[in-house]
Image (tube, helix red, strand yellow):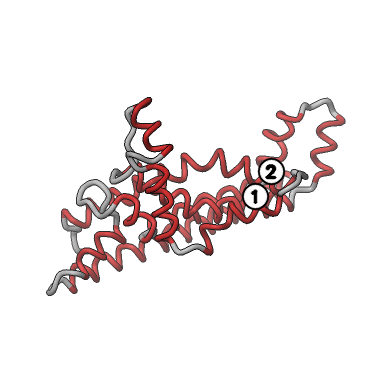
Amino acid sequence: MLALSPVEIEALRLSLRVGLWSVAASLPLGLAVAFLLARGRFPGKILVDGLVHLPLVLPPVVVGFALLVLFGRHGPLGAFLYERLGITLAFTWKGAALASAVMGFPLMVRAMRLSLELVDRRLEQAARTLGAGRIRVFLTVTLPLMGPGILSGVILAFARSISEFGATITFVSNIPGETSTLPLALYALTQVPGTDVPALRLALLSVALAMAALIVSEVMARRLARRIQGVT
């Protein structure tokens, strides 16, 4: 097995860091939005659904530009974060995590929403008749039954995050050691003559990482589904 070069290790480390933080930060909001869209009834629901899934159909560069306008040092949200909390997102790995989270968010919400819609509400009603409150029913009945969907949504969002390019390079640029994830490092190599072999290695590393995430998602989702079926 060939050892990874320092450039490959750095790009892999940044990709994993960005992917994990983007998923961890967006998971609570994704779960709330999935529950809102699956169970909620309110005016403008179609509009909210469209806004959630908008990153899937917009060019990633447009998403990155919107983030730059909003979260740049002089943007309305970016200025607030910098002046009040000392946080800078543009041109940092935190901004790369934000861009990746935005692009992977629709996939996460969709997987969890579909899983929630398949939950048998009679089981929730039965728990309520036994005296369990809404929060307890959600934590002990609904959430476990949603497990495969939550897991699939997390892995899909992670896979999307580590492969994100357009929104990331627009919002945080391609800064070695800071924002140069696997896709961005690969792009940088393709711009330099005579770097076909290093570029190919990064491409294969990206494919291997994405495939590993998808395989783990499928295996864990099946195991969790069998466990739930055994309990119910």
Residue 117, x across and y down, in percent: 73, 51
- Residue drawn at the location 35% of the way across and 44% of the way down: 95
Work out whether 137 lies above or below 121: above
| Comparing labels 1 and 2, the label whose residue is closer to the camera | 1
**Image location of residue 34, percent across then percent down:** 64, 46
Between 67 and 223, the residue placed more toward the observer is: 67
Q: Amino acid at mark 1?
A: Val
What is the distance, in whole Å, between disc 1 and disc 2 at their CAs? 10 Å
Q: Which quadrant: the C terminus?
A: top right
The residue under label 2 is which amino acid type? Leu
According to the image, label 2 marks what residue? 36
User: How far across and how far down the image is residue 147, in percent?
Assistant: 62, 46
Residue 218 in view, yes or no: yes
Percent coordinates x, y for residue 217 in the rendering: 51, 55
User: Residue 190 or 89: which is nearer the viewer?
Assistant: 89
Pick the front one: 4 or 162:
162
- Give the secondary structure at mark 2: helix
